[in-house]
Image (cartoon, helix red, strand yellow):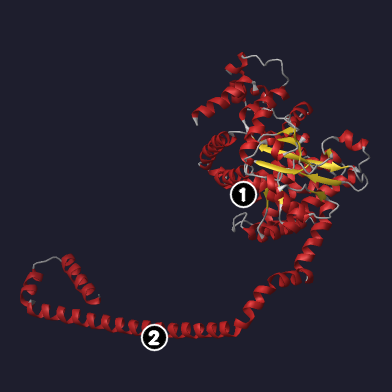
């Protein structure tokens, strides 16, 4: 662990990442410390600040590259030069050698590369943080791509996850940070990240996404070639499309960018609420656009290594929260947060609603280009801290995906009205979920189980009535036993008091003469105390 920390510190110093910190915005003590930092003695080198940041993230490994990929989708939060460099992390990470890729494929498949493929391109088509992709052709003539996991990557990832756990446990000791649930968030991230190392899971996720959007004009997912798919090697259909971040190519192809942006929002809500299965790594390197029908554009999604889903309860609460937000019913938002347990039960709904209103009201009914999400997120974070709202680990993937979608929409069509696009879909979904159709779908879904249990209902009802009668009889017997015990105890107490009083009288009678002589020589406080003691003994 200490070696990994030393390496991180060395990379920060080597690429002079301290120069990216806006020193003028720091508090006085930190600003003074930064000016005295020995790092200022090191040269920054010939590279620009954006390239130095990209090279540093690449040197630190896949977890840091993932972070850079996420940042690259938010050009509204970054200077253009840094955003352009981080964009290269999406599919231009330095590759590993082609000969090594061939050896890995042969090791996984157990056959020579020429037996498995009619052609295999040794130069990669794209290279990312965890895997790289090569072009190939099957003996049947079908063009495919071969995705290969980077060698020895799991060891580096485990060290970084261990480092994140160390930071999370330290953060957990800070009282204000406990509500962020850092350990649970890291555990959820660990599970998600290591799922990417098993290409069997990614292939299954891709097949599920393709099934969910079969014959849909919204989204296309490539087919998987299962006979040549293994844990570290996946073979899938080669797709042809325009990278969603290549605006010049999209405009040249005549793509309707407004329609494309609106469909991105619709795809997100369809995956989350209709299918409960959403692509959770939708950075621009994984999204393409089909140019076959420019006026009715279709997305193409690849790299389904990270997917998310919600419980039915989280789905309902999320949909109701969003609808209340779109309707500007902040009191309903507050009540739903309290009911779901996301804030404490002692939270006053009207105060929480007022705090949310102050943050969210300025951004409603505005296009994406006029919304400062940085300020909104900061305001919501301060509100959450004030009301001790806990982070929900199961929603972290969803929040990350929503940020990616919003970043894509801002690039494609800044005038997009996110609220008016999403609100009708949510209203329709809620109506279908809670209306007659939803009831009928639920009944149809559970019909086989109900039909199996229906003949048993009379027996189950009789058993339930018998258990209820037995419970009532036992309760009555217990009550009678308790009453008898109370009466016995009361009788025992009365007898004990009589015995004590009789014993006291007998003792006084036998010892009367000595006591009388003793009392003649005692002062009155001693006699009063003795009388009080005898009274207490008799009363007890």
Q: Residues within 10 Å of mark 2 (few under 14, many from 20)?
A: few
- Which element is circle 2 on? helix
Residue at image mark 1: 393
Q: Are marks 2 and 1 in contact (CB under 8 Å)?
A: no
Task: Depth check: give the residue in front, 98 or 15.
Answer: 98
| 334 left or right of 157 in image | right
Q: Which mark is residue 337?
A: none
Q: Is residue 331 visible?
A: no
Secondary structure at numbered mark 1: helix
Q: Is residue 68 visible?
A: yes
Q: Is residue 187 above or below residue 129?
A: below
Quarter of the image where one finds residue 525: bottom left
The image quarter in which residue 460 lies: bottom right
Residue 346 spot, x, y in % from top left: 59, 58
Total marks shown come to 2
Q: Quadrant of the C terminus?
A: bottom left
Q: Position of residue 37 (x, y in %)?
A: 58, 18
- In the image, is residue 7 above or below residue 150? above
Q: State the residue in front, 478 or 124.
A: 124
User: In the displayed structure, does residue 485 sit left or right of residue 337?
Assistant: left
Q: Nearer the viewer, mark 2 or mark 1?
A: 1
Residue at the image position 19 percent from the left and 81 percent from the top? 499
Q: Earlier in the sequence, mark 2 or mark 1?
A: 1
Q: Which mark is residue 480?
A: 2
Real-space CA distance between mark 2 and mark 1, rounded to the nearest whole angstrom:
52 Å
Query: Relative to 71, is 447 above or below?
Result: below
């Amino acid at each position: 662990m200490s070696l990994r920390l030393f390496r991180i510190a060395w990379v920060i110093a080597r690429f002079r990442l301290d120069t990216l910190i806006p020193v003028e915005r720091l508090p006085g003590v930190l600003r003074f410390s930064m000016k005295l930092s020995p790092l200022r003695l090191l040269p920054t080198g010939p590279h620009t600040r954006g390239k130095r940041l990209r090279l540093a993230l690449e040197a630190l490994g896949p977890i840091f590259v993932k972070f850079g990929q996420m940042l690259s989708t938010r050009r509204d939060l970054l200077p253009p030069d840094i955003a352009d460099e981080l964009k290269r992390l999406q599919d231009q990470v330095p590759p590993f050698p082609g000969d090594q890729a061939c050896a890995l494929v042969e090791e996984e498949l157990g056959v020579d590369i020429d037996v498995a493929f009619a052609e295999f391109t040794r130069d990669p088509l794209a290279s990312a943080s965890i895997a790289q992709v090569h072009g190939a052709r099957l003996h049947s003539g079908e063009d495919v791509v071969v995705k290969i996991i980077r060698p020895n990557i799991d060891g580096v990832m485990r060290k970084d996850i261990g480092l994140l756990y160390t930071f999370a446990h330290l953060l957990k000791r800070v009282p204000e940070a406990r509500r962020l649930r850092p350990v649970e968030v890291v555990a959820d991230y660990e599970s998600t990240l290591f799922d990417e190392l098993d290409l069997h899971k990614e292939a299954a996720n891709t097949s599920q996404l393709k099934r969910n959007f079969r014959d849909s004009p919204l989204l296309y997912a490539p087919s998987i070639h299962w006979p040549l798919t293994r844990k570290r090697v996946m073979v899938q259909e080669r797709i042809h499309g325009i990278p969603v971040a290549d605006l010049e190519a999209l405009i040249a192809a005549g793509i309707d960018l407004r329609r494309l942006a609106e469909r991105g929002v619709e795809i997100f809500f369809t995956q989350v609420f209709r299918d409960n299965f959403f692509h959770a790594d939708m950075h621009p390197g994984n999204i393409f656009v089909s140019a076959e029908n420019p006026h009715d554009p279709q997305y193409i999604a690849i790299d389904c290594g990270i997917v998310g889903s919600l419980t039915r309860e989280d789905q309902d609460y999320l949909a109701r929260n969003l609808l209340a937000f779109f309707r500007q019913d902040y009191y309903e938002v507050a009540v739903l947060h309290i009911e779901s347990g996301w804030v404490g039960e002692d939270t006053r709904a009207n105060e929480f609603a007022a705090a949310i209103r102050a943050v969210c009201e300025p951004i409603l009914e505005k296009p994406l280009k006029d919304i400062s999400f940085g300020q909104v997120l900061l305001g919501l974070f301060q509100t959450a801290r004030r009301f001790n709202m806990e982070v929900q680990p199961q929603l972290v993937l969803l929040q990350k995906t929503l940020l990616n979608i919003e970043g894509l929409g801002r690039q494609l069509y800044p005038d997009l009205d996110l609220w008016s696009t999403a609100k009708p879909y949510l209203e329709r979904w809620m109506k279908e979920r809670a209306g007659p159709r939803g009831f009928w779908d639920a009944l149809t879904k559970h019909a086989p189980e109900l039909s199996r249990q229906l003949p048993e209902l009379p027996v189950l009802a009789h058993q339930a009535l018998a258990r209820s009668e037995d419970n009532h009889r036992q309760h009555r017997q217990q009550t009678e036993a308790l009453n008898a015990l109370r009466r016995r105890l009361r009788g025992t107490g009365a007898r004990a008091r009589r015995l004590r009083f009789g014993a006291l009288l007998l003792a006084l009678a036998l010892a009367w003469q000595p006591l009388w002589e003793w009392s003649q020589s005692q002062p009155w406080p001693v006699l009063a105390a003795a009388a009080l003691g005898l009274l207490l003994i008799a009363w007890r």
